[in-house]
Amino acid sequence: MSQQVEAGEEEELHSHPEPRQYIKVAIFLAVVTAVEVAIYYVPALRALLVPILIVLAVIKFLFVARWFMHLRFDSKIFQRFFVTGVLLAMTVFAVVLLFYFTHGGPAPVAR
Amino acid sequence: MSAQEAALASTQEHHTSTGLDNTKMVMWAFLGSECLFFGSLITTYLLYRSTVLPDSGPVPSEIYDIPYTSVSSFVLLMSSLTMVLALSSSQRGDMRGMRIWLLATALLGVTFVGGQIFEFTDFVHEGLTLGSSPAGSAFFVLTGFHGAHVSVGILMLLSLVGMSMSDKLQPGAARKVELIGLYWHFVDIVWVVIFTVVYLIPLE
Amino acid sequence: MATAALFERRGFMSRPSATTGWWSWVTTVDHKKIGILYGFTAFIFFLIGGIEALAIRAQLAGPDGTILDADTYNQLFTMHGITMIFLVVMPMGVGLMNYFIPLMIGARDVAFPRLNAFSYWVFALGGLFLYSSFVLGGAPSGGWFGYAPLNRELPNYGMTFYSLGLQMLGVASLAGAVNFIITILNMRAPGMTLMRMPVFIWMSLVTSFLLLFAMPIIAVALFQLMFDRAYGANFFNPAEGGDPILWQHLFWLFGHPEVYIMILPAMGIVSEVLPTFARKPIFGYAAIVFAGIAIGFMGWGVWAHHMFTTGLGPVANAAFALSTMFIAVPTGIKIFNWIGTLWGGSIEFKPPLMFSLGFVSMFIIGGLSGVTHSIVPHDAQQQDTYYIVAHFHYVLFGGAIFGLFSGIYYWWPKIFGRYLSNGLGHLHFWLMLIGFNLTFGPFHILGLQGMPRRISVYPDEMGWNFWNLISTIGSGVIAASVLVFILNAVRTRTKGEEAGADPWDGRTLEWSVPSPPPAYNFAEEPVVRHRDDFWHTKYIEVPEKSPRRVLAGGANGHDEHSEHGHIHLPSPSYFPAMAATGLPVMGYGVIYNDTGASWPLIVSGILIIMLSLFGWVLEPSVHEE
């Protein structure tokens, strides 16, 4: 990594999506949101609600990150900064929550 | 190289060891850091979401208005679209288009924050406050910090418009718009997580 | 290109341009000056923290001490801890990182010079803000770790100062961290690949990543505490169902990486000093680098070892006991590599080396007591006793402080152009080593004898009198050693022997420039072909023989500025310092939130920050005359 590359040249090498591609992504995101809300109200799906919601949220997350934030097209280094933060947060906080929920949860619940 | 050219070079993109722009790298590093910030807030909420003693106000999930929050989530999601259209305009040199899309983004952001404020006043009337219970504390501090981040974003968007109108955005307008855009999309992503984890996922 | 518009000065304040005088220090964006500011400020806080320690030791010299009442004692031990951690070890490390990262990678400055200045001013003002608590109702008195629910129950403003002051310091650290990360990744001289970087640079990089990800967690905990104390929230209020253990999780998720943040820069320094004074390359460069990275990763997996006595359950306890034992492995690798560096070397026992040797030996002791903590039943005995106090002083004083002094003696000639006296340096070292062991060695015994932490008096019949007295005497010896250092530093300003560019026959790039370095660091950007490239410009390695000196190689002591025309450096700026002042203003607004001044102060603080940021963003980083 010792080459002195003109910063910004890297950008030119990658194509930017056309506005209409962005609009397609936005429509997709809107549809996913609508699905999330719809599922919330379908009693038959209650049992699967949480996993489905999580999956849908992850999908939205990925689409915004990879398309709108351009990670799909950019240097992997940017992705690494972000992914490290996300994975670290998910891991340590999952452990913290595990501490609680394997011991019957946090402080007494009112209801 | 003349003195002016050298000075110009030092304020613009320099040669870097990775070939990547310094400010863009800073923004990504900062966003990585923000994951831990919001992660802590979300975890606190997950812990406390039903921690309400008797006669201490409502449990937050009992008073959520999902359709209402869905609309504001949609608004924020669409603001990411207008943001990326602003970037696209700036990359093509269409400064007027950029300003319009930036203003649209800011407007959608204001709508979102306005919706939040309306929602919060409603909750307060129903007895859910910062001090009513740990659940109330966790809810308001999480959503409050998110709203504060959106508000800072709106200020930055308006600053970009102002700078563009007084011809202070060039050279490098596209880069600046890109940086604010990254911040804005991140704040949107955080809301994607909050909407699912806080509002949609039921208590039991 | 709108060049003219770019440099048009339409502001109401003209750009500062002073390069000398006190105002130039306020507006400087030069990493070297900022490094000196950090070092000087950290040293002042070291003296203050030391006086706090001396007061503690005076109170505990004998049983039934009457010098300090309990509340004053609590403030002193709390502020001693906060000071030494946040206002001494961290900023001193950052100061050396600031000064030497650009020089060691062949750069002219850090990536964001104004952000760098901002970091310093937020730190300095944050420290002052914290200390103002002493005269505004009382300093924080809940321990540096501020456990809940005491942290929210303690009356007066102390713990609110704690929540806000540490928050400000966190902002400074985070800003510094991003700056160093981008500097190290993006501003290396041509040819300096990652695996050719000095170990100090690697350790600084890992430290900065730890800061990047750990600071936000404590930020949340501190905000939650602030909301509890000042705005009626219930995060840690057991009466409303809040859980004090949540504070501990959030605090130690930050707190454990924090101890690696404190030790890694010192380990980096030692990894530079040992090769220089053994005249051998570092043994096992790759292993040391990867061990440092491993410590960075693994440091995230051990936090609950601070919570073994909170009832986490056997599974959690066992898991964290194992992860804590494992983290000793990369540290052990480093220690073996340092010993390997010295082995067979041509050793010069100068003060920088003495302090590094002190680091290695004292850190081994501290590390060993740390391993005993990892055994959960043993920790149940040790927790909240002086045994723990012994452990962390051995690693933080015997480790970090000795390592930082090693760096100070090593790099002093480069920074100031004069040597510190060797004789006084040796005296300082031996007094400090003896005093340190006299003070903290007995804590192992006292802890195992059951003496609890954080007590302001102990009764006569406990059997603790003798070792407490020894410890107090030891603290006096430490104080004497620090006076020796101060004498050394003051004397050297006028009587110090002048040092050239390369006083130690060094290996790394900072020794290739004059002492002190010119503002632009390098007249010509160096091109790097080897690890320890500077050494290779001076010596040709001959197998089985001593390296052969290259006649033309080495440092250029002359200022080549005139030969290379103007090198444009970032210009000084008001805005970083100005922006920094906004934070304490907001802080006082929160402190006094029960008065009418509260919102005006908070809003003023926000406005100061916003206006400063506007000015900062709109001014070009280089001011064209």
Image: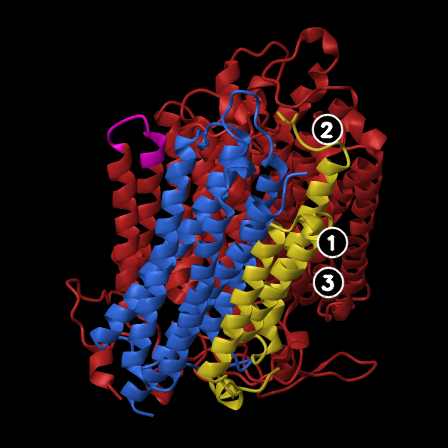
Chain colours: A yellow, B blue, C red
**Residue pushed farthest bottom?**
B1
Amino acid at circle 2 = Thr
Residue A99 percent location from the top left of the image: 73, 38
Categorize mark 3 by other alpha carbons within 10 Å: few (<14), some (14-19), many (20+): some
Is label 2 or label 1 in front? 2
Which of the numbered marks, if any, corresponds to residue C310?
2
**Residue C223, relative to residue C214: is it above or below?**
above
Residue C502 percent location from the top left of the image: 55, 71
Residue at label 3?
C347
- Quarter that holds the N terminus of chain A: bottom right
Which of the numbered marks, if any, corresponds to residue C504?
none
Task: Name the chief secondary structure element in magenta.
Answer: loop
Residue C202 percent location from the top left of the image: 64, 66
Categorize mark 1 by other alpha carbons within 10 Å: few (<14), some (14-19), many (20+): some
The local secondary structure at tag 2 comes to: helix
Determine whether, in the image, residue B204 is placed left or right of residue B52: right
Which chain is indicated by disc 3? C
Q: Nearer the viewer, residue B70 or C446?
A: B70
Residue at label 1?
C298
The answer to which of marks 2 and 3 sits earlier in the sequence is: 2
The answer to which of marks 2 and 1 sits earlier in the sequence is: 1
**Label pair 2/3, CB-CB below 8 angstroms:** no
- Quarter that holds the C terminus of chain A: top right
The answer to which of marks 3 and 1 sits earlier in the sequence is: 1
Which chain is indicated by disc 1? C
**Residue pushed farthest top?**
C461
Q: What separation in Å lies between label 3 and label 1 (alpha carbons)?
A: 34 Å
Amino acid at circle 1 = Met
Q: What separation in Å lies between label 2 and label 3 (alpha carbons)?
A: 48 Å
Residues shaded magenta = C588-597
The local secondary structure at tag 3 comes to: loop
